[in-house]
Amino acid sequence: MERVFLSDENAIDLFKELCSKDFRFEYIESKRKIFFKTGENENGLSIRLPLGLEYQNNSQSLAKKDFLNYILLMIRSGQASMGFFENGELMDHKVFRAYMVRQKQGKSQIKHLKTKGKSRAGSRVRLAETLEFFEAINTRLQSYFSEYRIDLIGLSCATTLIPYLFRSKVETPFPKDDQRLIKIPKHIDTPSYEALLVTHDFLNKTEVEVFSDEFETIFKLLINNNLQHPSENKDEDW
């Protein structure tokens, strides 16, 4: 499998070229990915759209977005980072921390409750901090939603923490099935300020993955002949 990153212009050109060859494709909105199919109906090539590009179903084309406000939110046990971006520029950010992890076992209090139940005072403190942690996150989200138009919400959150986000005493200002919500396709181990910037950079690149020999040959010809500004970053570290 080959992975490359392209400019927005090259992504649009690549999409047009592949469509002109009558390859069948499927757009998966939740992943922001276009999958071009081989003759055996298997995935031959995929294009993950950056935040600044959108697939237009009516015309079956790619187009740049004129203006975009979005929030990136990354949550792990004990730490979260959030940023509000206006047309690609970070306008405001916040890192949240809480005492949620049992020090000796390295296990979050939430996971401990599922296996052992409530126990000593330390557990009660960790549980209280967990609830306050999500209340603080949702309070910040509420402030962004009340002040700005939000076009997209990028979220990376451990499965065990999702119920705490959406059942917090302070309500999340969007439902779990909100159409603006996208899953960040990148593992974030520690959601720090630095990780927020790296993730933002990643989400604003068009990622192309080639899965079959047929599409690899076609893609290389397009790169060499038609695409004028291929990215220098080939197979970047996730």
Image (cartoon, rainbow, N blue to C red):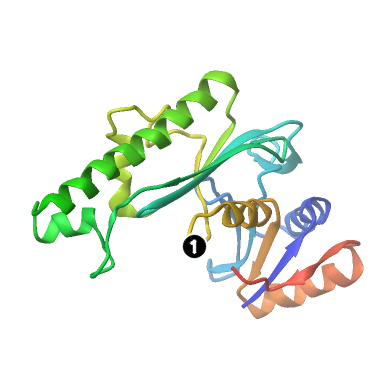
Q: Position of residue 142 (x, y in %)?
A: 46, 25
Q: Position of residue 204 (x, y in %)?
A: 69, 51
Tell me which residue sits at (66%, 44%) in the image: 51
Answer left or right for 4 relative to 93.
right
Quadrant housing residue 56: top right
Q: Position of residue 181 (x, y in %)?
A: 49, 39
Q: Which quadrant does the N terminus fall into? A: bottom right
Answer left or right for 49 relative to 177.
right
Residue 6 is at least partly visible in this image: yes
Tell me which residue sits at (73%, 31%) in the image: 67
Residue 73 is at least partly visible in this image: no
Tell me which residue sits at (76%, 55%) in the image: 11
Tell me which residue sits at (23%, 41%) in the image: 128
Q: Nearer the viewer, residue 124 or 67?
A: 124
Q: Nearer the viewer, residue 47 or 84?
A: 84
Q: Nearer the viewer, residue 208 or 107?
A: 107
**Amino acid at pointer 1:** His
Quadrant housing residue 135: top left
Q: Which residue is mark 1?
A: 187
Answer left or right for 84 relative to 201.
left
Quadrant housing residue 178: top left
In the orientation shown, which residue stands out farthest toward the front? Answer: 121
Answer left or right for 107 relative to 150.
left
Determine the secondary structure under disc 1.
loop
In the orientation shown, which residue stands out farthest toward the top? Answer: 146
